Structure formats: C-alpha cells, structure tokens
Image (cartoon, grey):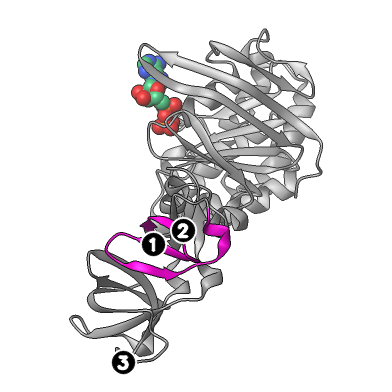
Amino acid sequence: MADGNVLLDVSGVSRSFGDVRALDDVSIQIRENEFFALLGPSGCGKTTLLRVIAGFEQPDAGTVTLDGVDLLPIPPEKRAVNLMFQSYALFPHMTVERNVSYGLVCEKLPRDEIRTRVDEVLQTVGLTDKRSALPRELSGGQRQRVALARAIVKRPRLLLLDEPLSALDRKIRGEMQMELKRLQHEVGITFVVVTHDQDEAMSLADRVAVMDQGVVRQLDAPLDLYRRPRSIFVADFIGSSTILRGSYSGGAWQSPGLGAIPAGPDCADALAVALRPESLALLPPGDAAAIRRGTVQEVYFQGDHALALVSVGEVSFKANVRDDELPTRGSDVGVAWDTSAVIPLFEE
Ligand SMILES: Nc1ncnc2c1ncn2[C@@H]1O[C@H](COP(=O)(O)OP(=O)(O)O)[C@@H](O)[C@H]1O
Ligand SMILES: [Mg+2]
C-alpha cells in the first residue's frame, strides 16, 4: 500500500505529434510504494506518458518531478526510473543470469555486488534454478519474469511497465498478475503499470488513472472508479453498464424511450445515469415490483453467473442472473432496481 508521500509529480504535461495531442494537460501524482495503473484504450497516450517520465520523450509543456527534483533535464539513464518496454527483448544468446546482470555490468558495479543482487532478484522471481538457461528454453511466463528481474535488479525508485502481460495467454496472465502484485509488495518499488485491460488495472492497482485521447478522465481507487464513475466514458469502459441518457425532473429520471424511472436527487445535474448489471433484478413479467417489462434478447454464460440482455423498448438492459435461474431467450421478464443503485454521470 502507498505510504502517502508523493514520489512522482506530473503536472500539466502536454505532448503533440503533428495534429495528434497524445497528452493534453496531464496531471498525476504517484505516491511512494504505490501500485499505480494507467488504463485506457489503444492510442490514448499511455506509452507517451511513460516515455516522458522515463526521459525518452520531452513534453511540450508541463513539469515532471521525482522526490521534488526536476526530471526533465536529466537524461534517461541517469533517472532513478526504469521502463520495461511493451516489446521487451531478452538477449537470446545470454543465460538468464547474464540477461539479468547485464545492466549492472554496464554500470561497472563491483563483481561481488552484482553477484549478490542477481542472486537475490532471481530468488525473488523464482528463477534461481533457471539461472543457466537460455531464453528459448523458458516458457513465456518465465521469460516475463526474467524481464522483470532485469528491471528490478537496478533498484529504480520507480518501475514503469508498459503492457507487461499483454504477450501472455490468459491463464499465465492471471498468474503473472498475482506475481506482479506480490513482487511489488516484496521489493518495495513504486510501480506504474500501463494496460488497456480494465480487469487487470482494477485487480492490481491501488489507484487507477483512466485515460482517453490524451486526457486523464478520472483518477481513483478501483472501488471508487467502479462505484462512482463520473463520466459515460468511464462507466462504459470499466465494467459493463446500462447507460441511460436523459434528465432529472419531477423526482425521477426522464429517459427517451423509457419515460420516468425512479432515481435519487443525486441525479439532478446528471447527463446520463448508469446501472450496473448486478444492480438489476429480473422478475416474472407481472411482478408488482417490476419497473419495466422487457424481453430477453440474449444470455451470455460467464462462469459463476450469466449476463442477460433485456430489451425494453429501444433500450437494452444488462442484468446478471444466477446460473440456476437462467432465463430463456425470447421470454418476457420484469426489470427492477433500487434507486440507490442508479449512478449519476456528469460528463460524456
Ligand atoms: N513518435 C510518434 N510520432 C507520431 N505519433 C505518435 C508518436 N508516438 C505516439 N504517437 C501518437 O500519439 C497517440 C498516443 O500514442 P501512445 O502513447 O502510443 O498510446 P497508447 O500507448 O495509449 O496506445 C497515438 O495517436 C499515436 O499514434
Ligand atoms: Mg502503448
């Protein structure tokens, strides 16, 4: 968990490439020992931000400080920051041990120290018995660990990881996510992980910045992002929601095609409202508690539950249903929710 001291302060950073504003007035403070995630769709500026922090890119405007010291005049190799690239490459002809020690050898550290640090880090990532192996003799997950070891062994204050798990298949990815989290706790380095995978960001990070077209749309702890998205973009990007545009009047949410539906006064200034699928209940069509009646369009099995798409007029509601209560396609159902589950959204 984060200790609270600000380690990295990115303030008002912008960077354009021709007409593309890759970063548009980005401000983010990252705390000591924090596990921080940058989340957003492809092309939203995540890699550019990491490159600015690491020193491979200069911003057009703004400041970046680490421990209060201006980073911008400092060349990348002199910053206490390490960037693990999206397409990291191990040296194919070098053993695990030499891949990991390479950076320290380049820094001309004493041999004994290199030895100790490499031993330690191989232990941390669980590759001690693979120290003499070549990269091609390792699995994808093991190669990933070597890349991590290589980054950690240099003991940066800040480790930047650009889509570190995107090359791995789903199962190994899940394992490596747990591994990354454990590692971060163990080595006590501040991590910034870039991902376009919302589940990954939400499960790994202490806080998440959601980016869209060069702009930070929201920066919060995962639970707050999920429960209180402020914009249609964030509500839609994180989890899946039914989003209803409209306006609040007469103590209810007036949504085109649906009419007045119950919602609390916190929706008074909203542009739209969101309903999470777990907040919707499907009832028998004649049930007195049903707010609207609809037809089940599709049912998607998800493992421990299923997601039902229910059309009510032109609106498609998403509702979680239990495995043992799967509705049939085409059946009529009632839809109900609690007023307190209606999430107001104030921006596009
Ligand atoms: N060196 C560059 N030259 C021109 N355009 C670039 C360059 N780097 C990034 N961009 C553009 O900036 C935007 C953000 O890119 P990037 O930071 O790589 O996004 P992400 O990592 O979120 O996918 C994209 O539109 C991309 O095409
Ligand atoms: Mg990228």
Specify few, some or many for label 1: CA neighbours under 10 Å numbering under 14, 14-19, or 20 or more. many
Residue 328 included in the magenta stretch of the image: no
Residue 184 lies, in percent from the top left, at: 68, 46
Work out whether residue 302 or residue 237 is closer to the camera in this orientation and state it.
237
Residue 255 position, x and y percent, is: 35, 61
Mark 3 vs 2, N-terminal side: 2
Q: Secondary structure at mark 3?
A: loop
User: Which residue is nearer to you in this view: 187 or 23?
Assistant: 23
Residue 254 x %, y %:
39, 62
Which residue is tagged 2?
248
Residue 208 in view in this figure: no
Q: CA distance from mark 3 to mark 1?
A: 23 Å
Q: Quadrant of residue 131?
A: top right
Q: Quadrant of residue 188?
A: top right
Q: Is residue 292 left or right of residue 225?
A: left
State the mark number for residue 254.
Answer: 1
For the residue carrying disc 2, how many other residues have a C-alpha within 10 Å: few (<14), some (14-19), or many (20+)? Answer: many
295 over 48 or under it: above or below: below
**Labels 3 and 2 touching (C-beta < 8 A):** no
- Disc 2, disc 1: CB below 8 Å? yes
Q: Which three-letter amino acid code belongs to the residue tagged 2?
A: Tyr
Q: Which residues are magenta?
A: 244-268
Disc nearer the start of the sequence (3/1): 1
